[in-house]
Image: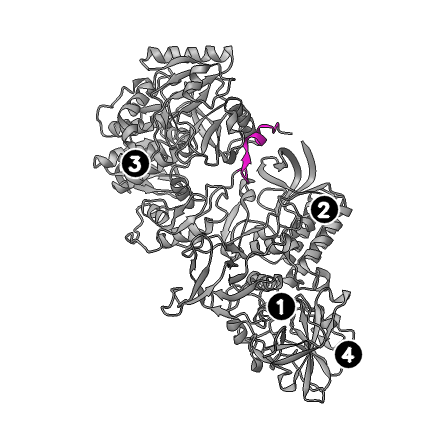
Amino acid sequence: MNDRNRELKPFVEAPDDDMIICRCEEITKGEIRRAVHDGMFTLTEIRRYLRTGMGLCQGQTCTKLVKSIVARELGVKPNALGSATGRAPMRPIEMQILAKDKGE
Amino acid sequence: MKHYDMIIVGAGPAGLSAAIEAAKRGMKVVVYDENAKPGGQLFKQIHKFFGSREHYAKIRGFQIGEKLLAEASELGVEVVLDAIVIGIFPEKEVTVKIGEHVTHAKGDTILIATGASENMVTFPGWTLPGVIGAGAAQTMMNLHGVLPGHRVLMLGTGNVGLVVSFQLMQAGCEVVALADAAPRVGGYGVHASKVARCGVPFYLSHTIVSAEGEDHVTGVTIGQVDANWQIIEGSEKHFDVDTICLAVGLSPMSKLCDMAGCDMEDNPAKAGFVPVVDEYGETSVSGIYAAGDVSGIEEASSAMIEGRIAGIAAAVKLGYLSEAEGTAEIEKQKAALGGLRQGMFAPGMRGKQITETEEGIAISQNLLQYGFVSDEEVERFPGVTHSSGIHPVMECTQNIPCNPCQDACKNHCIKIGSHITSLPSVDPEAKCTGCGMCVAACSGQAIFLVREDCGDGTAEITLPYEFLPLPQKGEKGTALSRKGEAVCEAEVVGVRTAKVFDHTNLLTMKVPKEYAMKARFFRKGEPV
Amino acid sequence: MKADVVIVGGGIMGCAAAYNLAQNGVSVIVLEGSENIGNGGSVRNGGGVRQSGRDPRELPLVMYAIKHIWPNLSDMLDTNVEYHQQGNLRLGGTEQNQKILEGLTERAVKCGLDVRMISGDEAREINPYLSDAVTCASWCPTDGHANPLMATMGYYKMARRLGAHFISDEKIVSLRKIKGKVCQAISASGNVYEGDQIILAAGYESRFLASTVGVDVPMQPVLLETLVTEAVAPMFWQMLGTADADFYGHQTDHGSFVFGLNSGLEPFAKPGKPVSSSIAASAACRGIMRYFPSLAEIKVVRSWAGWIDICADHVPVISKVEEAPGLILACGFSGHGFGISPAVGLVLAQLATGQETAVDLSPLRYGRWA
């Protein structure tokens, strides 16, 4: 995993490559698979490169799905891939509500 | 800034239980929950829970939620609803969005009890409206009174899939089938059996090939999978449905723990990304605890005990309880937790294939494959006996930690003994009066009263019935087998409802005596 | 393991240098200490590609990048880096602000940059979403912004395709001189990486690594925070900043707004993992809404923090080191490295291969503090 020259099986297009995996950002399975072949090996890198899990649900729905796709592409177990960092706000919040917050 | 001894995030079973234990010791406790109603998943659980009497067995989930809430508020716990914890910051500070405002609060301890969210699986059409989580379906019907659909296919035969399938039927939906990619039913056999005898087919080793529809689901195709999880060509089956429910597991909602800086692990045994906790539920950050599904997916009953342990541990940490007292109380809770984590469905048993019960009886393979125990298999279990008069028939064939039936019978007809996972057996010496308490007490709806021979060529079967409208005495209909197939005509000879039965009605039907051990459900309407 | 050049740090500087080297057939190993490529400031910044407001000593680098690299970068990297060159507005609302902006503008004009002061109304003509609170602004039409995530991952992707060898989760703990020449990087697990040249581009960590071969760069880490909103329909493409420096940012191709924040507490953040404060996002929202009231109902979906490496005189060190031959420093970017990163990648490759650099690097030399 650390060695980014790790040999991967050649990328072969699959019939379900156009299936949407991250619904919020409309990222397909094929895009995720290609990203792995372009060197995005961790969940965080996939996220930074494709925006998976960066939408309104913040990855609550797709994280496991993305993980399993990446893991299969890399030939590793899904839990070897780490997870994306939890960040505030846990739920989307309007700027005008935050703007009223004076730390009290 | 507000300040508390303990800030609890999540008013579910774990959060409320912790709040109760902490407040009992004099701690100032607040519980924040993002939902409009407290109780987490408890308030949508309309079925009776398993377990022992001390731990709310045979009480319906939502009533457990009500009890916890009442107890918490009596103890002065502040429960704030529609309160979204949006962040957790150093020095145990949380920010909470309440209505249109953000407030800050600090706790000397924090419990993160945020529960879990539903997993999804992908197949062509999985993003169509009409594909929903089983938990979401449950929220719609049981919390909001909205029918999720009319014809439903359920994917997943774990307890969630089984329980929600039954509840969908109770709400008036037609469940066309249950499918599961696994080769065996994952949830409790008794939950499966009550669904199967309503006539719902089980398709194990089957998964969804595709959902059909333009702008919403209009149909679904399932297919059998081979050892490599690939669809076997020609095995496809199509159903017209408007709803597909996915009950394919839960994932801990642990991002707050991660944000709080707790050490995390991706642990498949705990179903995902969870904080590393010690035996008290304390994370690597001193004073921050996690309990319930957020630290590993289990049942609500274990979440409640984990919550209690965290509450007591926090009280010890903050000096509200002496170390000695705390240790003693935690030991009691741990023993209870140990009791729950026994039997065939214990966390440690995941993935293991069980062939025999603890009593050495071969497991019903039919149950695992098709959701019901076959007529032949059922005879080998200790709850199933034959005698001339009325007697209980307990079709309880798996070791699960549950024993209310034993206490339900005033005449001690039913024996489980001190080992809570033992299968119930019938005491041939004790006299059954046909009171039906055992039938109503069984959370698995697996106990029947049978009079095998009424002397006139008929038999009478009393079964638990939780559908509306209730059949009337004298009404004729069809008796269904364990598989849900019509076996004979049946006449309702009694319908008993009583407060003590807690909405489990006792329906007694008369069938030809050769069906005494075959007929297990009653279908209203024209007889066959 | 050996290569012509060993790069310590898999951020955008390291990736861009690796790309430029690999393209010229130079063998490269890139060592990233964390699990993820581009884990530091490279992916945590506000995405500005600005000339205005920049120190004259690093202005040539950014001008070179804007003229020669940024416009073609998406094609070069086979990655949409979302570069927009539609100007930078630095906003002011008080007389004090006006003075600050005039000072910055005057300095930039002297360096030959097309930047000028404009009135509040002129600013609103450029960006109709600005409130009346804006009374003045500096305007640099050739400035812009890009997506730091895509640029960083794009450089990585292309460098890797060209044969650069990346290794992540490989924390380098020391450099080593052999017979007077810095040529080894040694990891925590004891692995030794050998190169004719070692490029040190590891953010603030560079300080500790440089000191293992007797070199010190006077810098300190400072926390910066950023927030991002949900996506909305496109509103404007300018890069924004303020005279008060309380926020800066832009709308991305995706539709979300990315804003860098400044609550004033950042220099006092605790060391360790970068952690957002509980009030910074709220404070930034107040600042943003004062100038952009129409963003009031847009939802913030995420915020994050990151460390920047502030050099004593607020410009980076991009330099060979006389007393440590073989070592090339690329650190101390002081929170404004992203815009210059394509040019830095180029000049680092030029330094490592002994070529003349595209711009004069002497103002950024090591040892300039004497």
Magenta stretch: give its range: A88-102
Q: CA distance from mark 4 to mark 3?
A: 86 Å
Return the x and y of residue B40 as percentages of the image width and height.
63, 51
Q: Can residue A97 be found in the magenta stretch?
A: yes
Tell me the tag on residue B22.
2
Q: Closer to the camera: disc 2 or disc 1?
A: 1
Relative to C313, residue B440 above or below: below
Label 2 or label 1, whichever comes before in sequence order: 2
Type of amino acid at the residue the image marks with label 1: Ile
Label 2 or label 4, whichever comes before in sequence order: 2
Q: Which residue is mark 4?
A: B433
Return the x and y of residue B82 as percentages of the image width and height.
64, 42
Type of amino acid at the residue the image marks with label 2: Ala
Q: Which residue is mark 1?
A: B400
Q: Residues within 10 Å of mark 1 (few under 14, many from 20)?
A: many
Q: CA distance from mark 3 to mark 2?
A: 56 Å
Q: Are marks 4 and 3 in contact (CB under 8 Å)?
A: no
Q: CA distance from mark 2 to mark 4?
A: 45 Å
Q: Closer to the camera: disc 2 or disc 4?
A: 4
> Could you tell me which secondary element the residue under label 2 belongs to?
helix
Count numbered badges in the picture: 4
Q: Closer to the camera: disc 1 or disc 3?
A: 1
Return the x and y of residue B163 as percentages of the image width and height.
59, 63
Q: CA distance from mark 4 to mark 1?
A: 27 Å
What chain does badge 1 belong to?
B
Q: Are marks 4 and 1 in contact (CB under 8 Å)?
A: no
Tell me the tag on residue C6.
3
Residue at the spot x=47%, y=11% of the render?
A: C98
In which quarter of the view is residue B165 placed? bottom right
Q: Nearer the viewer, residue C287 or B50?
A: C287
